[in-house]
Amino acid sequence: MQLRVDALGQFQVTLDGHSVAAPAWRRARSAALVKLLALARGHRLHREQAIDALWPEMSPEAGSANLRKAVHFARRTLSARDVIMLDASSVALAPGHDLVVDAELFEAEAKAALQGGDQAALARAADLYRGDLLPDDRYAEWADGPRERLRQLYARVLRAGRLFDRLVEFDPADEEAQRAVMQAALDAGNRGEVIRRFQSVRERLRVDLGVGPAAATIAIYEGALEQDSAVTPSIADRVRASLAWGIIHLHSGDLPKAAEIARQARLLALTGGLGREIGEASALFGMVAHMQGKWPEVFQSEFTAWIREAPAAVSNVFDGHLCLAEFCLCGAAGHEGIAKAARDLLTVAEQASSVPGRALATLILGEAALFSGQLDTAEQLLSDAGRLHEEAGAVAGRVLALQRLAEVALARGQKYRAGRLMQKGMRLAESSWLAPHLVIRLQTLMVAGAASKARAAEAITQGDRWLAGQNVCQPCSMGFRIVSAIALAEDGDHDRAGRRLDEAERLAGMWNGGPWLAAVWEARGVLRRAQGHEAQGAALMREAAERYRELGRIGDERRCLGRLAEHSAAVPA
């Protein structure tokens, strides 16, 4: 008997030359067992290893029963009893038969080609990699290690073989590969290709997230801009080069230079009517102010000036300040200080008859009311803010207003209304250049407002896909990481919940002053209770409630106190 298991780019089993159709795998765990054994060293595992991988939450007895069922259904699917051996100590795939696994073939060829250094051999090895390992099992923990190992090996093969076009396709964020392709295009006189690829690099690295291309990459781009003396670089091209250099100065610690570049780039973008670039320049300017500890003062003076002097650009400027504004609203300084600034801005906006200015100030006031637990006031202000942002044509502001209105609805138990608001916001968010910030915020509410555990699982999967495929803003992803950990803990998936909380706690430590440490404590409290540690869970919940109270987040404090009350009711006197 010859058995071939293809796992790169797809899962396909071929037995004696005949492919097993995908619908034949009616039992997911039987297919998972075949995949697990195909990846195992020697295609054999101890019974306990297989059970721990596929059914980590089950008792040994229940896990053994599931293993026997999986073996039975795999044998039935493949119409061959000896395709899987199961005895008292181990389980093995096709022992004593001709077994071929495409992942093994690639790994062996790749290692040999890397050792030999022959370009043709490297190209042949690269051809064997037909896609990521088991793409339909992206969230199976037992596949994570092998998948990442093979991805890294493939990247090494492409780099050693100087197959940069394929490396860029495989990993668009690989700036070294992008730079090699850009240099080749510049050498060939293809100025347009260099400019296009530089913009692609910027898209992946994202100025608004505080990262940008390296100096060597910018130099190639500037070389393309200067290549044809008869063609004057566009304003957009010049702004993009300036912003890239601004990020370089930001990370080198030359904050005054970074701020000056941001100012000049923003003025240039304003003359060209480049809304996104106005936002990106504002993001850079805001990051400098934050690193200097001056952001709240800069925020107020910035918007006062823009409302009076260039009201049409107010929404674009706010796009760039979005994350810092949200952070300061939620931070240790509390929302009361920024709400006071918003009231002052509202007065200025009304005097200037600025719709974008009124929209921004009203949104901030609505968020402050929501955090203070004043749901009626928040709903009115946020509804007004949404209408004003729509009138101003400001997508990000509309999405934030819809997000907060959905939070009001969830606080009132109105899940249906919250769902409609989220869906409307999601359609807008996905079309925005700020999607890496906005979509994951809405996905947080999709999990929190799910009508069932199955719906919550679907929302978590969607959010995970977004995190895996996009350069998502880490602070904006915190809410999703927390609520998904809580949902997983309550559904009994304690291991996945714990891993998410470890990552969330690491990120919370990088952004001191916000509500995220309290949120991590709250989620850990839920996890401890789900694990049967009631006293620890209650203690963590009390700490979270206290922290929320210090931040003035009354709604979050009430939720924690509600969880504590549930704990008290569940524990016998």
Image (spheres, rainbow, N blue to C red):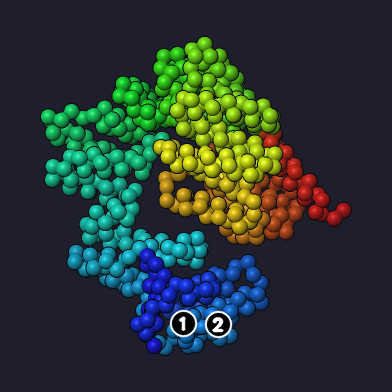
The answer to whether any part of residue 130 appears in the image is yes
Q: Residue at x 27, y 66 (%)?
A: 127
CA gap between label 2 and label 1 equals 10 Å
Return the residue at label 1.
78
Q: Is residue 526 above or below residue 146?
A: above
Q: Is residue 42 above or below residue 52?
A: below
Q: Secondary structure at mark 1?
A: helix
**Whole-percent x, y for residue 13 in the image:** 41, 76
What residue occupies the far right of the structure in this picture? 573
**Whole-percent x, y for residue 325 in the image:** 52, 29
**Whole-percent x, y for residue 428 in the image:** 47, 38
Q: Amino acid at mark 2?
A: His
**Is 410 on the left-hand or right-hand side of 171?**
right
What residue occupies the far top of the structure in this picture? 351
Q: Secondary structure at mark 2?
A: helix
Neighbor class of circle 2 (other Cα within 10 Å; few <14, some 14-19, many 20+) is some
Return the residue at label 2.
72
Query: If you read the primary sequence from the N terminus, does the residue marked by circle 2 or circle 1 appear first?
Result: 2
Q: Residue 470 has which mark?
A: none
**Whole-percent x, y for residue 521 in the image:** 65, 46
Q: Amino acid at mark 1?
A: Leu
Q: Are marks 2 and 1 in contact (CB under 8 Å)?
A: no
